[in-house]
Image (spheres, rainbow, N blue to C red):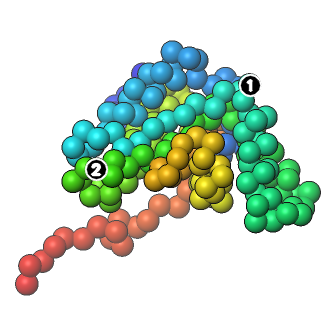
Amino acid sequence: MFNDLSTPLEFLASRRSGRPRDMVEPGPTTAELQRILEIATRTPDHGKLAPWRFVIVGKEQRGAFAEILHAAYRIDKDQPGRLEIDAIEQFAHQAPTLIVALHSPKESSKIPRWEQELSTGAACFNLLAAAHAHGYVGGWLTGWAACSDTVRDSFGEAPEKIAGFIFIGTSGGELKERPRPDYETVISKWNAE
């Protein structure tokens, strides 16, 4: 599909994240979401470990997800303010589609944990690229909820970690280009001398 762009390179150069709070319907259909997730799993994976999992939080489950977030937040802050409560509620209900990405390391493997973490990040990016290829916008968020054991325990168990919350939908407005690093500051040529 390549999102009506003429070449795969133009497609890759056009991918950008969208703000989940600005995403609107429609989101991916069931078949599209399955294809997006299948593509996400086609990622570098030393040892063929699949050290990642994806959990789809359906629209009918967003209220329960919000309750988990509220309870987890109150563990460290028993009297949250109105703005904090509203932010949690918005987070739980934004965008048409929500996928929780879990880093699921294989402890018994000889493959270093670092490589498994890199594979998880690559799988998340593949998910975002696949959503873009289907004409949707994606946003990958972390924040306090990704670091909460209480939230994590709703989706998995230690030693798993939440790699992020990936929201997918249709952009509610024009996507803005964000500043990118200058080529010369992040690319160099190695000199052995």
In the rendered image, which quarter is residue 9 located in?
Answer: top left
Q: Which residue is mark 1?
A: 60
Q: Dot 1: what SS?
A: helix
Mark 1, Cα crowd under 10 Å, few <14 / some 14-19 / many 20+, is few
Report the number of discs.
Answer: 2
Q: Residue at x 54, y 43 (%)?
A: 156
Residue 90 percent location from the top left of the image: 79, 44
Percent across and percent down for residue 35 are 44, 22
Is 126 situated above or below 39? below
Q: Residue at x 87, y 58 (%)?
A: 83
Q: Is residue 108 above or below residue 11?
A: below
Q: Are marks 1 and 2 in contact (CB under 8 Å)?
A: no
Q: Is residue 3 left or right of residue 109?
A: right
Residue 127 appears in the figure: yes
Is label 1 or label 2 in front? 2
Nearest the eye: 23 or 187: 23
N-terminal of the two: label 1 or label 2? 1
Placement of 68 over or under 171, stated as above or below: below
Is residue 129 in sight in this rendering? no
Which mark, by number, is residue 108?
Answer: 2
Which residue corresponds to the image point at 79% horizontal and 42% vertical from the top-left? 67
Quarter of the figure with the N terminus = top left
Q: Quadrant of residue 41?
A: top left
Q: Position of residue 12 (x, y in %)?
A: 39, 40
Furthest residue toward bottom: 193
* Label 2 SS: loop
Q: Amino acid at mark 1?
A: Glu
Toward the left, the furthest residue is 193
Side of 74 where 181 appears, left or right:
left
Q: Residue flagged by tag 2: what amino acid is it?
A: Ser
CA distance separating discs 1 and 2: 37 Å
